[in-house]
Image: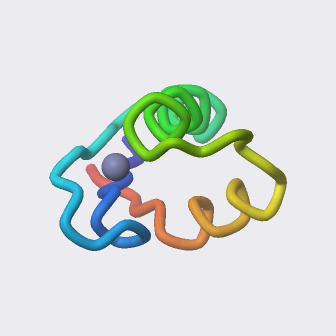
Amino acid sequence: MKRFNCADVIPGCDHSYSGETEEELLAAIAAHAVSDHDFDDFTDDHRCMVRGVIKEEA
Ligand SMILES: [Zn+2]
């Protein structure tokens, strides 16, 4: 299981996501970034940043 805490990249955001695959997580995170953080687009740079803070959980 992989987990992403949005606060790791957007301090103060209390959303977190978990999923079986990184792709699944990235899809949910991209939607969250656009709708909740007013991102115009979710770019490859953003994906890299997110991948850097995704944690593995048992
Ligand atoms: Zn967030």
Q: Quadrant of residue 48?
A: bottom right
Q: Is residue 35 left or right of residue 43?
A: left
Q: Residue at x 58, y 35 (%)?
A: 30
Residue 41: percent from left, percent from top:
73, 40
Q: Quadrant of residue 19?
A: top left
Residue 23: percent from left, percent from top:
65, 33
Q: Residue at x 28, y 73 (%)?
A: 11
| Colour basis | rainbow
Q: Is residue 30 left or right of residue 37?
A: right
Judge whether 23 appears above or below 4 on screen. Answer: above
Q: Residue at x 30, y 57 (%)?
A: 5
Q: How many marks?
A: 0
Q: Quadrant of the N terminus?
A: top left
Residue 36: percent from left, percent from top:
38, 37
Q: Residue at x 79, y 50 (%)?
A: 43
Residue 12: percent from left, percent from top:
19, 67
Judge whether 54 appears above or below 27 on screen. Answer: below
Q: Is residue 39 left or right of residue 37?
A: right
Q: Nearer the viewer, residue 41 or 20?
A: 41
Farthest residue, direction right = 44
